[in-house]
Image (cartoon, helix red, strand yellow):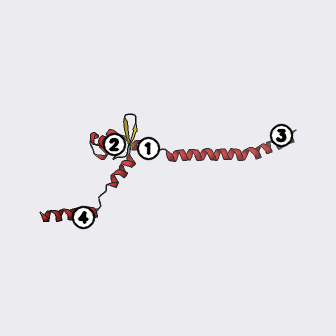
Amino acid sequence: MENDITILKDSLKEILEPIIEECLTRAMNKYINLRLLEPDDYSSIFDLEEAAKYIKLAKNSLYAMTSKRIIPHYKQGKHLYFRKDELDQWINIGKVTVDDFEAAANNYRAYRSRS
C-alpha cells in the first residue's frame, strides 16, 4: 500500500509540476506586462490648471487649443487631462534651431533693407 502511494505521488508530481510551472510563468508574464503598461507616476498626468501652469499659458488659451485640437489632451466627461510626456513632445515639435533663427533674421534684414 505504501508503495502504491509513492507511485501515485511520483505520477502526480510528474503530471502537475509542468502544469504548475506553466501557470506561474504565465502569471508572472502577465504581471510584468501590466506593470510595463501602467504609468510609473500619476503625477505625470495634469488637469487643465496644472497643464496651463506647466506650459505657462492661460487656462483659456489652453482650453481654446484643445477645442481646435492643436495640443494633445484627453477628455473624461467635462474634465480635460494632459500627459506630461505628450506636452513635452508637443513643445519640442515647435523647437526652433539656430539655423531657422538665423534664416529668419536674414529674411528680416533683407526685408528691412528694401524699405
**Numbered circle sitting on residue 70:** none
Q: Specify whether 40 is left or right of 97.
A: right
Q: Specify whether 76 is left or right of 33.
A: left
Considering the image in quadrants, where does the N terminus appear?
Answer: top right
Considering the image in quadrants, where does the C terminus appear?
Answer: bottom left
**Residue 108 appears in which quarter of the rendering?**
bottom left
Residue designated by label 1: 41
Helix, strand or loop for disc 1: loop
Residue designated by label 2: 66
Q: Residue at x 28, y 40 (%)?
A: 59
Residue 57 in the image: state x and y as whole percent: 27, 44
Q: Earlier in the sequence, mark 3 or mark 2?
A: 3
Question: Farthest left residue?
Answer: 115
Q: Residue at x 52, y 45 (%)?
A: 35
Give the distance between the C-alpha atoms of the residues marked 3 and 2, in whole angstroms.
71 Å
Q: Nearer the viewer, mark 1 or mark 3?
A: 1
Task: Name the residue nearer the viewer: 100 or 67.
Answer: 67
Give the distance between the C-alpha atoms of the residues marked 3 and 4, in whole angstroms.
87 Å
Are discs 1 and 3 less than 8 Å apart at CB? no
**Numbered circle sitting on residue 103:** 4
**Numbered circle sitting on residue 5:** 3
